[in-house]
Image (cartoon, grey):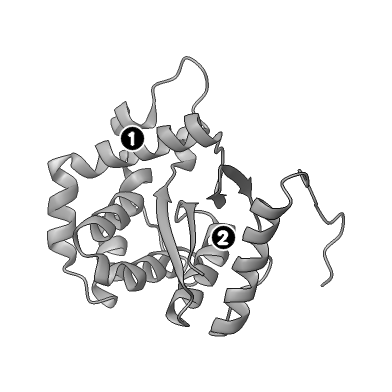
Amino acid sequence: MTLAFAVSWDYRCPFARNAHEHVLAGLQDGAPWEVEFVPFSLSQVHVQEGETDVWDDPAKASSLLALLAGVVVRDQSPEQFQAAHLALFAARHDQGGDIRQSEVVAAALSSAGVDAAAVLAEIDKGWPLATVRKEHTEAADRHKVWGVPTFIAGGQSAFVRFRHRPEGDGAAARRTIERTLDLLTGWPDLNEFKHTSIPR
């Protein structure tokens, strides 16, 4: 049975990294999922009332760079998206790179076999920014998304944090995502479940 769902991301968030690694590991393990990857800007979330939206503020343009690059690959080279997606998360969270810098983003893309110069050229055309703005706004308006990662399925949406990464275990990744989706769509009465302490 095919499961269809969407999941939001911003490369700045470590919990988005964990969730998306699970999604990608599950897909690579053969999970029958139809996944929509939704860009969502944490910079825009933190814009205060009366301030300029991040889309219209040149001073904040660099905060969107990696997100824009991910959208370009997603939309123009979908066969390379999974590798590029992992590489951009790794650049920030495994390598400690500043993904506001074009050279860091370019290196991550190149490591995934993507033509980085072509991606950056597409960003300069402006359509990736329009795409991120549209998809972010739709997620916020339609599904009340306010953070990443948010899973959306069956008319339900939930912000989710996984403490663990799949570490190459595709079967475990599939169980993690499918358990999450089962709670999301099968038991929407559960509104919040948060551990008060984290085992170390």
Tell me residue 149's x, y (percent): 55, 52
Q: Is residue 162 left or right of residue 174?
A: right
Q: Give above or below for 28 relative to 115.
A: below
| Callout 1: SS | helix
> Which residue is drawn at the image coordinates 37% and 39% (left, top)?
135
Tell me residue 54's x, y (percent): 38, 31
The residue beneath circle 2 is 14
The outermost residue toward the front is 1
> Which residue is drawn at the image coordinates 49% and 54% (left, top)?
7
| Callout 2: SS | helix
Does residue 162 appear in this view? no
- The quarter of the picture where the C terminus appears is bottom right
Q: Quadrant of residue 178?
A: bottom right
Local packing at callout 2 (Cα closer than 10 Å; few below 14, some 14-19, many 20+) is many
Q: Give above or below for 152 relative to 43.
A: below
Local packing at callout 1 (Cα closer than 10 Å; few below 14, some 14-19, many 20+) is some
Q: Is residue 129 left or right of residue 198?
A: left
> Which residue is drawn at the image coordinates 82% and 64% (left, top)?
198
Which mark's residue is nearer the viewer, 1 or 2?
1
Tell me residue 177's x, y (percent): 60, 67
Q: Is residue 172 left or right of residue 196?
A: left
The residue beneath circle 1 is 134
Q: Give above or below for 101 relative to 106.
A: above
Q: Is residue 99 left or right of residue 168?
A: left
Does residue 199 appear in this view? yes
Q: Earlier in the sequence, mark 1 or mark 2?
A: 2
> Which residue is drawn at the image coordinates 31% and 57% (left, top)?
70
Tell me residue 29's x, y (percent): 48, 83
Q: What amino acid does circle 2 point to? A: Pro
Q: What amino acid does circle 1 point to? A: Lys
Circles 1 and 2, Cβ within 8 Å, touching? The answer is no
Gap between marks 1 and 2 measured at Cα = 24 Å
